[in-house]
Image: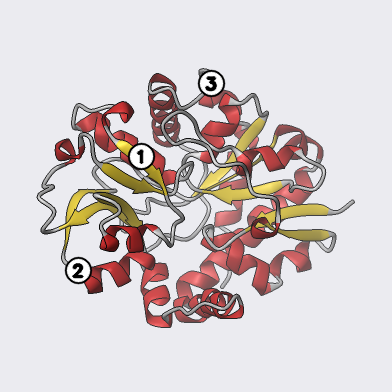
Amino acid sequence: MSIRVGYFPHNNSLFVLRHRGILERLLPEVEWVDLRALPHAERVDPKVGLPSLHSDQLFTEDGYDFIGTGFTPPVTGLANGRDLVYVGISGPRVENGRLVAAADSGIETVADLKGKRVGIAHGSWQTTLLLFALEKAGLSWSDIEPVDTDVRDGGHALLAGDLDAWVGAYPGLTAVEAATELRTLVDTESLFSHPSLWFTRRDFAVDNRAALEAIIAALQESDAWIAANPRAAAQYFVDDIVARGGSADLDAWEAALRGRPFGVNAITEEFLDEQQHAADLLVANGLLPGTVQVREAVLPWIGDVVEATKTSVAV
């Protein structure tokens, strides 16, 4: 039986693991599925809904059995009736991104965004960050004009004046910082822990426990290597971008990786509180079809496996 693991550059841990050969040593039957090669979900109007591609593909024959994403996709999947379970989380990624505007825009606080165009990679952690920021400022989703941008394109749109504000992430944010003076409207740390996270189907976790344990162990080993070798890890991302016809700055990628936490941690009550808060806000603002109880997506024994692998990692 082939075990299919989804990966893409935005989950740094799985992207590096794909290139390291560690999982193949533990799980010879692994098959890697590049999310970028799968059919894209139809665009969803960011005013009225959320795309659910990453969670939906856990439940298709040509999809995958295990995936890592940012904060929002598992909540989206749960709201759409997907029987997924959390596997683990990274530490807080407080330096990964922030909500910014051009310094000369006249926008000084989140409250000034009423009626403004705000760019996000919709359906990602950026949607949650923006929603949390609006709540804190006493605004709702309907008070702004959300614009769905690719993670890479939002910075160009901000510089061109097509956006009033943007949730930027490193390393892409580095180029925008070099091109113009920015004002930080809200940082990540003041809103939520913003971890990377990993999840799977409930039936896969229950029926393929040994394979799941191997994936977790491989992630721990690979993440320890990234933390010890950030420049070598950054080269994987640069090489991938260049192979696709783009250009990338190795120093910027290294800096981005150095600013991120690596290692898989067990799901915590604090994380579940944040996920529940996000789910409730998404429902209240009309972005999800139904309520979610995130604690129903927890299998306690998975946390025990995660903690056990943390004590046995060698770089």
Q: Residue 208 location, x and y as percent? A: 80, 43
The residue positioned 59% from the left and 37% from the top of the image is 52
State the residue lying farthest toward the right.
1
Residue 89 versus residue 104: which sits nearer the camera? 104
Q: Residue 77 location, x and y as percent? A: 59, 32
Rounded to the nearest whole Å, what is the CA distance between mark 3 and mark 2?
39 Å
Can residue 96 be seen at all in this image of the molecule?
no
Badge 3 crowding class, 10 Å Cα cut-off, few under 14, some 14 to 19, many 20 or more, is: some
Q: Which residue is mark 1?
A: 146
Badge 1 crowding class, 10 Å Cα cut-off, few under 14, some 14 to 19, many 20 or more, is: many
Q: Which residue is mark 3?
A: 289
The residue positioned 52% from the left and 32% from the top of the image is 75
**From the viewer's perspective, is residue 281 above or below residue 231?**
above
Residue 223 versus residue 160: which sits nearer the camera? 160
Q: Looking at the picture, which amino acid does disc 1 mark?
A: Pro
Q: Nearer the viewer, mark 3 or mark 2?
A: 2
Residue 118 versus residue 126: which sits nearer the camera? 118
